[in-house]
Amino acid sequence: MGRLVLHWVRYVAYLLAAVGFYIVYEQWISFYLLLAVLLFPLFSLAVSLPAMLGTELMLETEPEWLLRGEVCTVSLTASPGGRILPLRRSECLLRRENLLTGERKVSSPVFRGVSISQVWRESFPAEHCGLLSFRAERAVVYDLSGLFFRRVPPPTPVVRMVSPLDCPPDPLPAFPNGTEGHGAPLSLRGGGEDYELREYRAGDALRSIHWKLSAKAEEPVVREIQPPRKPRFVLSFDLRGTDAELDATFDQLVWLSRRMLLNGHSHRLCWLDPETGLPEERAVEDETALWDCVLLLFSAPVPKHQDTDGPSRSLSPWGERPDWHYHVLPQNRASQKDGDPE
């Protein structure tokens, strides 16, 4: 709006000069000059109005799928809607924000003399994982004289994910029932039959009676075999730290989760909510579920400093130790507690 005020100040100065010239020199040329100065704003608005009403902005980025470290290019196109008529300028504010890290930047694209479509571009490296949000705000277009303006509807915001790199932890862990990594293959706890005890009911087979407990209880006690449960595998991590630490955590987490899926192991991702400190978990049955979880994690900012003690290293959403638990550490080294071979 500062430019608009400046243009009006200049116009008023020109108008006062034309009035003064007419007063001291009352001839036809001074009259027509004053008349031209008076009518110029209306003439400028009339010839620019169709293009002002038709001006549209379009926001795009490329590539659509970004890996951390790649260069992202954002482009903003100003189009007068096919009307080749003079405009002074068009401008807006372009806000870029990483929703995970909270990093923000504001640019001010300017299109001068917009009579045909013009494109403004800016390239930058996507240094950290997260969701990049692009929004154009306060878009205005000025007529030929710069005395009148119209607010342009903002373009549709664009959101792009900056995906982690494939970076395995060092050293590699011993996967469930596998031989990868430097550790020995892990065996799942509870390999025998699971059962529960209950009172004898008519029709129960005699071989299901637990004779020793029945003798102690002085009444028949039946051992009922439970169906085998599905193994419970957990990948936990700390949703906190610096931007570089978050990058290292997500690099390893995605690599580990995809390797688990490749080995046929569905699992759960577990972490502590950075705001409430409460346990959060998401089931990962396939890569779609994995990326849905990553999208969820990337959608909210992470505090830079937290006082939460006891990260999700011991986290277990089932109220008991899982069959296999791996905790991801940000410094490219993961620790494995539950499931270490004895």
Image (cartoon, grey):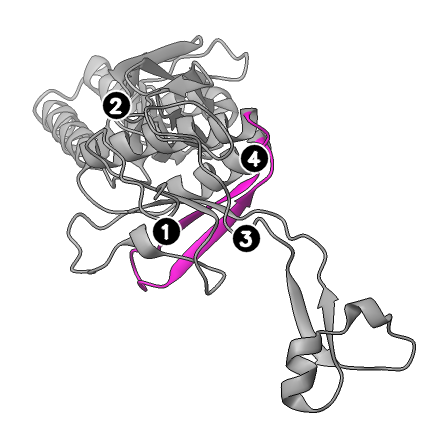
Tell me the quarter of the picture where residue 307 sits. bottom left
Q: Residues within 10 Å of mark 3 (few under 14, many from 20)?
A: few
Tell me the quarter of the picture where residue 182 sits. top left
Q: Position of residue 126 (x, y in %)?
A: 28, 21
Would you name the residue on which mark 1 appears? 271
Nearest-to-viewer mark from 1 and 3: 3
On residue 190, the disc is 3
N-terminal of the pair, mark 4 or mark 3, is 3
N-terminal of the pair, mark 2 or mark 4, is 2
Give the distance between the C-alpha atoms of the residues marked 4 and 1, in whole angstroms: 19 Å
- The answer to whether residue 215 of the structure is visible from this angle is yes
Q: Is 184 displayed left or right of 97 in the figure?
A: right
Give the distance between the C-alpha atoms of the residues marked 2 and 3, in whole angstroms: 93 Å
Query: 68 above or below 4?
Result: above
Would you name the residue on which mark 2 appears? 37
Q: Residues within 10 Å of mark 4 (few under 14, many from 20)?
A: many
N-terminal of the pair, mark 2 or mark 3, is 2
Q: Amino acid at mark 2?
A: Val
User: CB under 8 Å between callouts 2 and 3?
Assistant: no
Comparing 178 with 114, the one in front is 178
Q: Amino acid at mark 4?
A: His
Q: Residues within 10 Å of mark 1 (few under 14, many from 20)?
A: many
